[in-house]
Image: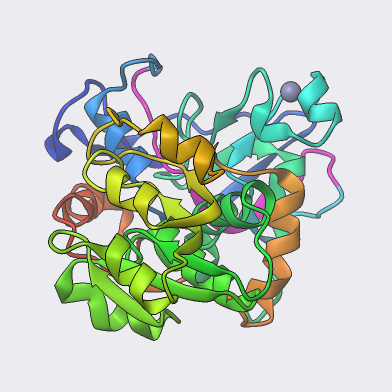
Amino acid sequence: MKAVRFHEHGGPEVLRYEDAPDPAPATGRAVVRIRACALNHLDLWERRGLDRVRLPLPHISGADIAGEIVDSGGGPLPAGTRVMLQPGLRCGRCRACAEGRDNQCVEYDVLGLRSDGGYAELVSVPVENLIALPDHIDVVAAAAFPLTFLTAWHMLITRAALRAGEVVLVLAGASGVGQAAIQLARHFDARVFATSAPAKAERTRALGAEHVFDHYSGDYAKEVKRLTDGRGADIVVEHVGEVTWDRSVRALATGGRLVTCGATTGHEARIDLRHLFARQLSLLGSYMGRFAELREAAPLFFSGQLHPRIDTTFPLREAAAAQRRLEDKEQFGKIVLTV
Ligand SMILES: [Zn+2]
């Protein structure tokens, strides 16, 4: 098969479009002919090299995949079925897996992290990772759905236990997770505020945010309080990190929950413990999501109630150009490789 691989860590120039071995058929694992693979920031970190994870080289990135089954692996879905893939990988044997907390699995992994992913014509995945697509769902949209909506679902619904009528502040609302969080919060009848760069504010508002604040300048914590009669946000969805942390904590209402899945601007944060206990705040960490959660979210996508926005598509061989666009932060919506 053709694949985009890197043999050493570095800039986008290390990505090579080349021949790679086809994945071997195996019982319990399906082989999927990839039609589309969406980019995530995870792909950039893999290419640059991660502190804590040593990747097998050469490596094929790509966690968000849609295509069709070419080998069923003995699973219930026959060859030819159009599918999108659950991006999480679990052992299926540990206590967390048995209790349905599979993103806490002792061997939890993400497609394209330690295993080969979707920057290729073919991929091998456990049959339990296959989710059949209805005919009207396009593969590009299907590839753009799983990772960000799964992450946002786990943050808002499972970790922060969102209730209708609550105030949700979504940091970096124009990002993949941000866009998904705005749509989900609106779907569950929350009142939504967001932050973004000024150039993306209008499009972020169109996703369902009542107000969009500039997160580079100004004090959005003060603004959220002003717009909620001094109360603040019940839930803050964070993934920006160091630069916004202080304002995000201050934006919380008494009893508020801050849920974070990332730290793109740095991971050194401090907190005044008096605020934590006196205002009864909860700080919640979140990483990816569970198999059951993606199966719960998928019907809302299939029925058109949630829709991933597509920024641009690139042919697989232009993966380096696609990653440059993601690095330049010019995109609004997902960047998708078509195969
Ligand atoms: Zn497990």
For residue 68: magenta? Answer: yes
Give the image's coloring scheme: rainbow
Relative to 231, 212 lies left or right:
left
Q: Quadrant of the C terminus?
A: bottom left
Residue at x-position 41% and y-position 70%: 230
Split into quadrants, the picture shows ligand 1 in the one at: top right
For residue 105: magenta? Answer: no
Residue 65 appears in the figure? yes
Relative to 286, 296 lies left or right:
right
Residue at x-position 51% and y-position 41%: 278
Q: Nearer the viewer, residue 334 or 98?
A: 98
Picture coordinates of residue 179, whole percent (x, y): 42, 67
- The correct choice, above or below, for 196 with respect to 127 in the image is below
Q: Quadrant of residue 19?
A: top left
Q: Nearer the viewer, residue 64 or 281?
A: 281
Q: Nearer the viewer, residue 295 or 37?
A: 295
Q: Quadrant of the N terminus?
A: top left
Residues in magenta, as a range: 57-75
Residue at x-position 43% and y-position 40%: 275
Residue 137 appears in the figure? no
Relative to 72, 57 lies left or right:
left
- The correct choice, above or below, for 229 with respect to 291 in the image is below
Residue at x-position 73% and y-position 28%: 26
How many labels were placed on the picture? 0
Picture coordinates of residue 159, whole percent (x, y): 64, 46
Picture coordinates of residue 91, whole percent (x, y): 73, 23
Picture coordinates of residue 13, whole percent (x, y): 12, 37
Q: Quadrant of residue 270?
A: top left
